[in-house]
Image (cartoon, helix red, strand yellow):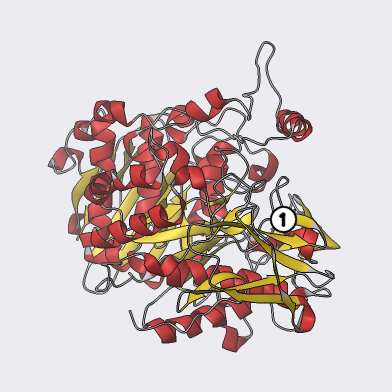
Amino acid sequence: MKGTTFSPTFGVKYKDKQAEICLWAPDANDVQLAINENGNPLSMTKQERGLWTLSTDQLRPGTSYQFVVDGSLIADPASKLQPEGPAGPSQAVDLSEFSWTDGNWVNFDLSEYIIYELHTGTFTDAGTFSGIEERLDYLKDLGITAIEIMPVAAFPGTRNWGYDGVFPFAVQESYGGPQALQHLVNACHEKGMAVILDVVYNHLGPEGNVLTTVGPYTTAKYPTPWGEAMNMDDAGSDYVRQYFIENALLWLSEYHIDALRLDAVHAIRDFGPKHFLAELADAVRDLEQQTGKNYHLIAECDLNDRRFLESTDRAGYGMDAQWVDEFHHALRVTCGEPAEGYYSDFSGLAHLAKAFSSGYVYDGIFSSHRDRTFGTKTTGIPGSQFVVFSQNHDQVGNRAFGERSVVLYGAAKARLMAAATLLSPFVPLLFMGEEYGETRPFLYFMDHQGAELVEAVRKGRASEFSFAEGQEPPDPKAEETFLDCKLSFSTAAEHGKMFAYYKALISMRKTDPVFNAADRSALQVDHDESKQLLILDWNTGMHKRRVCFNFSDQPLKLDLPDQGEYSAVFNSDDQCWGGNGTAAAEPEQAFTIPSLSVIILAN
């Protein structure tokens, strides 16, 4: 890595063993630094526009500190570690002390990403970054090229999805803290895997937030599902924008993270002349020039607006890719998900066919769920800018009982869904455990400390769902709810056929010249709703592949004029994958698609 000139404004940084400290508190009259809760506080100097600064050799790495703002003690809004949680003091950390060994690491292009989303607390029994490290060989054997870690910003208690973080710069202590995260990223790079970190720039958690006590970090101009929006365009927004941009650059430069997944960017409200995301994208491009590295920004966005994917020099927002929920919705309805709520906009197979060909289903057509025309065309956008999945933390965890696909639809449909995702012209993402057919749920859980807030969350979650008589909604505060979500790797061997199936599909994705190229322009999609048949025809000029999905409960005979040009190379109903059929290579089975299965034909 080239030397980086990234030097954050906020928080604590070290230069020649001196701690350079900065707090933005525009309305404060007096700010001091209290070290170790003892000794005399050190006075800080007010600079222009509310920045308070101090240079001292008394704040050494590992030392606890707090700010005294007009007589009130608060933790550092840019703290890198909260060892006692959000309510406690901050601890000074010098991230440059870590000894990296990943100098030869080169990040993959997004087209090469095969993403595995995981939650640190439930991925292993240990629930730590070191626990993840112990599973890296397992993920490498599966064929994963990038892990995506759900948010690690400090939150109250010891268990949370991560979207209730209140210290965006601080790494959750119960996961292992900053050095353990650096160690994990270094280990991933040594294993040949990229690391994506999920970050939240659209809201703060409901408990333990200190940002709004020192400055206008939020604005009442725009409501969000989580309260006031982050202040990206109101009075005082310059330093709010800089705060979050520095946060992104910190993960990329000091933790060597390869990509950021930006949570719910549609909830980042910014009507200024240059959108926050565009400013962030340009800052990341500048960092690339400084470090010689390549980074990716992946947005979670439900607006179907191509501006998020357009470059900033074309007045776009500069995101490298986005999650596409509509692929998931169409796939699930095709597999039997009731067309209710946001699923009501999806007809099943016809919309799945469109998702394969267009990325967006709603690309400028009328949406009955929204009661308006919705979306933009995706012409010219490569498939590597769309991340697709058959399940993820949201789609599993926001069900009342957190059921996974294999529980809801059965193993045969789970295999269909896996093939649809992994053989799509897009970037595939798997959710932890699906690769071996995990049946344990992924539920919503939290460990808020305030009794009133806990009760409000309980009531709020319960009111979102209807429960049969005698059913009790899982208590999100209960430790048992959290423990129920731990992956059962001890029983993974019992599901070896599903694991082998995923491994075979991933290998095909990585080595087959057609599936590896994933060229949208080389794909033609056909479907027959009466037969519940979907056909993906790939033609690169040199190679042809035909992927035939049978979503019905009856076997289907293919009757295509050119079928003599093909031979069958894969059958999801093969007994080796846990199916009922015989090997796809047997001629008499080659052009019969068993029920609820997919066959792959090669030219």
Q: Nearer the viewer, residue 311 or 529?
A: 311
Query: Residue lying furthest top in this view?
Result: 470
Q: What element carries label 1?
A: strand
Read off the residue under disc 1. Answer: 74
* Direction from residue 47 to residue 144 in the image, left or right: left
Residue pictured at 57% horizontal, 44% vertical: 394
Residue pictured at 34% horizontal, 46% vertical: 130
Residue 115 in picture, x, y percent from top left: 38, 55
Q: Quadrant of residue 562?
A: bottom left
Q: Nearer the viewer, residue 78 or 153?
A: 78
* Direction from residue 54 to residue 510 in the image, left or right: left
Query: Residue lying furthest front in this view?
Result: 39
Q: Which of 202 and 539 is in front in this view?
A: 202
Quadrant of the rendering where the N terminus is positioned: bottom left
Above or below residue 452? Residue 435 is below
Packing grade of label 1 (10 A; few <14, some 14-19, many >=20) is many
Q: Quadrant of residue 259?
A: bottom left
Above or below residue 85? Residue 283 is below
Residue 42 in picture, x, y percent from top left: 68, 68
Q: How many labels does the image show?
A: 1
* Direction from residue 588 to residue 79 in the image, left or right: right
Is there any visible trace of residue 453 in the rendered image?
yes
Residue pictured at 79% horizontal, 56% vertical: 72
Residue 480 in picture, x, y percent from top left: 53, 23
Residue 61 in picture, x, y percent from top left: 48, 62
Quadrant of the rendering where the C terminus is positioned: bottom left
Q: Nearer the viewer, residue 563 or 351?
A: 351
Above or below residue 549? Residue 563 is below
Identify residue type, mark 1: Ile
